[in-house]
Amino acid sequence: MKRDDGTLTTNDIEKANMLNDYFRMVAEKLIGPADEIQPLDAYSRDNADTLTMVSIKISQKEIEEKICKLKVRKATGPDGVSARLLKSAGMSIAPSLKGVFEHSAKACKPPDQWKIARVSAAFKKGREEDRTCYRPLSMLSIPSKLMESCVADTIINHVVTQNLLDSRQWAYRKGKSTEQLLIHLTERWREAVEKKLYVGILFVDFTKAFDTVSHNMLLQKINDLGIRGDLWQWIKNYLTERRQFVRINGCDSDTHIMTHGVPQGSVLGPTLFSLFTNDLPKSLRSAETYLYADDTTIYCIAETMDLLTNTLNHALAELQKWCERYLMVPHPEKCKAMIVQRQSSFIGPIQALRLGKNIIKWTTSERLLGVQVDDKLSWSDHAANVAKSFASKLSLLRCMRFLPRKQLEDFYTKVILPSVTYGLIVWGSCNKTHLNNLEKLHARAGRIVYGLPWDISAEDVLTRTGWDSLETMYKVRLTEFVFKCMKGFTVTEFKDLFVQRNSGRRRNEDIILPRPETNFIRNSIRYRGAIAWNSLTNKETTAKTLKDFKRCLRKFDTDGMIFEPILAITKNETPVTNISDMVLSLILNFKLYICFSNFYFFRNYCLHDPTSNADLSYRVEIKFLLTYLLNLPISVQLDGSSLASNLRSLSLSKSLSAECAYRQAGVASVASAVDMKPVDIPAFSANARIDITLLCSFMVLQYPRSTVFSTPIKPENEKSRMK
């Protein structure tokens, strides 16, 4: 490790002391000595009438539950009491721990041994010999963490029930997670861009966020939140005179007292930090601010680029003012800005963004809550990063092939696969090419675990292993999320994400499908979730609990959930009986290009709803255009009254070769309208068959039931089709 004079040392004790000195002094260098920091005169008096919480709530049942949830692989603290030992003792040790915790709460201070931390230096990135590239992880006493958990529960219960925690702080809130925050943010951004607006995003990173928290300011803030009395005094004694030492290869550094910050690796530390930054969203009035612990995301929406950059600069000025007041230091190099907009919607120089004396750099891709977000929300960069990490982890898995199959499979499904599928519900709409690459790596893992031949196909690998494909995992998670939203099992921010169709008919569980203009909505959870939900049967949609829904979903064939653009049939208020005129209108309005050998249309067919006694008129809307033509044609008999029924059985990811009866009338007018030369109309009989090949993929929306039809028709053999 590099000394201050530039020379290197390999002595473990010296390296440990160098790291401990750096961790101890970094806060003083950034915000000054602790004794020079004065308490706040008045942080906020908005909560002056708030009920106070003055004592720590401890119950034996709660302690027993926390002991049962202990992870036996957790690192042991300086006192040597391991989580495995506590869990092995089971319920018999709970009364003794309860007595210790109650004595600590009554004395308003934790035991001195619980305030000693053994620090492990975790390397982040950069040069390994540079001590600034490490962050401290505090290994605390396991009984101390149990006590901290009781205190944290008391605090969270108080601020939540009193509605003191800002709704834009998503950390440590029941039912809220990083994945849900990603969904909430990206869906808002997609909706704004679809409306031809600009979205500006600031990714804020604080330098040594946990280590630079002022104890005086933190205590003042929690006092203003109604945390007072014995509970406030216990937290004060918990923060003051904490000591730590660094251990490297069994060698310990000297022990030093920490005058700033909350311990990383503790249970109570992140909760206290969340309370410290709780007023940040309200302080930034120019933009929306969302927090997850120390992850801060600021965004604003504007109609023009100039208005957007001006608003972002105003938000940065407000952020700088807040940081100066509470002695937080933004990292100028790690703070980034990004603009999400439609393709080529703005050309020209972009105004610079300033945070204090520093200029914020623009980027087209940045990491947010563990997911790489790009300016088109295509998730291509993230999928590529996941594939790279996935491949390296499979190399480690290959080196472990000597293990029994059961242990090898557990390691893959419980360690490797969760890291790959994190946030899958958000980035699962990425390009099919990226998802296929991940599917290949998933199949490679199956070959390693089960010792299968390398030339076996990916489909056979999944069949033999009994694993789900990543695409199936994505569809299942997406559908489960929609179920939670529809049944009210999730947070209030998602209550209006899906709009239920209120038709009064038997399929009133369906969701109204948005009509997207761009891929921003087409790849959104709002759009794809509606398609997935509408493809379910009544058995799944009428489930009462999430457990019942998951059980029904396991028996459902998710391969029928197709998210590509398709032909839509919706109810029309005015009856349409002239099909050729209808198709003519579609050609003129949507610029649909049709590749044909014989180009004919039939008229005077009224489409019928087979699920209803009454005849319903429909209009056909060809929504989107594909730039490629798939190879496998599907034959469909369009015979008038059963047209809607046949459309249900289209294979939606294939191009369509339709066999249909034709009417001679209207062909010439259609051909001339699209600037084509009239073709000779042969004297076919009324039962003659023609081929119409469309350069589009289809989705069918039958009114009143919006659904995606998943049962494919088997293609005719080549000899029959050529006839």
Image: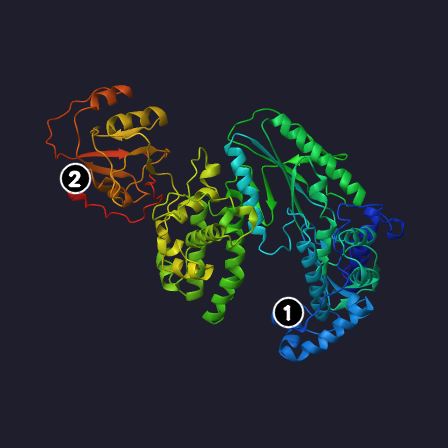
Disc 1 on helix, strand or loop?
helix
Task: Please say if 84 is above or below 383.
Answer: below
Q: Position of residue 507 (x, y in %)?
A: 35, 48
Front residue of this view, candidates 299 and 65: 65
Disc 2 on helix, strand or loop?
helix
Residue where numbered disc 2 is placed: 722
**Discs 1, 2 touching: Cβ within 8 Å:** no
For residue 448, what is the image quadrant?
bottom left
Front residue of this view, candidates 669 and 41: 41
Q: Nearer the viewer, mark 1 or mark 2?
A: 1
Residue shown at the point (73%, 66%) measured from the top left: 140
Examine the rendering and report whether any part of residue 382 can be seen: yes
Residue where numbered disc 1 is placed: 66
Classify mark 1: residues with Cα within 10 Å, few (<14), some (14-19) or many (20+). Answer: some
Q: Which mark is residue 103?
A: none
For residue 464, what is the image quadrant?
bottom left
| CA separation in Å, label 1 and label 2 | 70 Å
User: Horizontal placement of 99 versus 530: left or right?
Assistant: right
User: Amino acid type of disc 2?
Assistant: Met
User: Amino acid type of disc 1?
Assistant: Lys
Q: Position of residue 32 (x, y in %)?
A: 85, 48
Residue shown at the point (77%, 42%) measured from the top left: 323
For residue 257, what is the image quadrant?
bottom right
Q: Position of residue 61 (x, y in %)?
A: 64, 72
Who comes first in sequence, dot 1 or dot 2? 1
User: Horizontal placement of 506 versus 489: left or right?
Assistant: left
Which quadrant is home to the N terminus? bottom right
